[in-house]
Each structure stands twice: as structure tokens, then as C-alpha cells.
Image: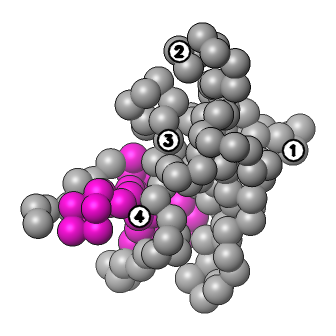
Amino acid sequence: AGAAGLGGATAGADGETYWLEARPWEGGRNVLVARAADGSTREVTPADVNVRTRVHEYGGGAFAVLRERGEVVFCDFSSQRLFVQSLAAASDSAPRPLTPALEGPSLRFADFCLDAARNRLLCVMEDHRLPGAAGG
């Protein structure tokens, strides 16, 4: 089935590290994984989520750890919607949508950056709702 691909590594709070793990044995699904300071690892995103974006047609920048809030924002591949989820290891909270459900993946998001001073999330957004728009 092949080995897992790793990408997008980033540091979190309290010595944690996060990365995307591409799993060929799960149809290429990308899972957000956390490694604690003690070396233990866990899946952050639920089993039905594929953390991936279609921005620029190749993806990349599909998640960001929001250290100040103890959360992660990510793009779900099937819908291209943005979700936010707690990073707490004991949390059983489901991801909460940040963007509306639209017909098809017509809006695409990537490369997230939290502007904490203004309480907003900045990112790249491609709009594919109109024919010919952003290559759509």
C-alpha cells in the first residue's frame, strides 16, 4: 500500500508538533497528526475528513495551527469548506464549519494566517462560481 507521505510540519504550543500524513492505504486521505512532547502521537482530524485543498489545482497550505486559541483551521477536500477544531487531546468536539456549504467545491481556501489583533483569519481564496473565473 506504500508508506505514508509527510508534509506541512509546524510547531504548536507546549512542545507539540503537527503535520499532514498522506495515507495510501486510506485512498490517499490526508490526516492531521499531533506529536506531544513525550513522543506520543494522535490523529487530530476525524476519520471522515481529508485535509487537503484544491487551491492552485495542486493544493498545499491546507491547515494552520492557531496556537493562541488552541485550535486548528483546515480545509476539507470533498467540500473545500473551512472548519475549525479544538487541538485538545481530550477533546471529542467535532469540527465546526467556518464557511457555508455550497454546491460543488466552488470556493477554495489555503495558506491561513490568524490576525489575532483584529480577530480574523486571512487566507488565499479562489472563486470558481463563474465560468472562466480563477481557471474554473
Q: Earlier in the sequence, mark 2 or mark 3?
A: 3
Residue 38 or residue 63, whichever sits in front: 63
Q: Earlier in the sequence, mark 1 or mark 3?
A: 3
Residue furthest to the left: 2
Q: Circle 3 is placed at which residue position?
A: 53
Is residue 134 among the parts visible in the rendering? yes
The reply to whether discs 1 and 3 touch (Cβ–Cβ < 8 Å) is no
Residue 66 position within the rendered picture, expressed as x and y whole percent measured from the top left: 66, 54
The reply to whether discs 2 and 3 touch (Cβ–Cβ < 8 Å) is no
* Of the two numbered discs 1 and 3 in the rendering, the one whose residue sits closer to the viewer: 3
Q: Circle 4 is placed at which residue position?
A: 31
* Of the two numbered discs 1 and 2 in the rendering, the one whose residue sits closer to the viewer: 2
**Is 21 covered by the magenta stretch?**
yes
* Of the two numbered discs 4 and 3 in the rendering, the one whose residue sits closer to the viewer: 3
Residue 30 or residue 64, whichever sits in front: 30
In three-dimensional space, the C-alpha distance between marks 2 and 3, rounded to whole angstroms, equals 15 Å
Is residue 63 among the parts visible in the rendering? no
Q: Circle 1 is placed at which residue position?
A: 119
**Relative to residue 98, is residue 109 drawn left or right?**
left
**Magenta range:** 8-35
Quadrant, the N terminus = bottom left
The answer to which image quadrant residue 40 occupies is: bottom left
The reply to whether discs 1 and 4 touch (Cβ–Cβ < 8 Å) is no
**Relative to residue 79, is residue 51 drawn left or right?**
left
User: Looking at numbered disc 4 in the image, what kind of residue is underneath it?
Assistant: Val
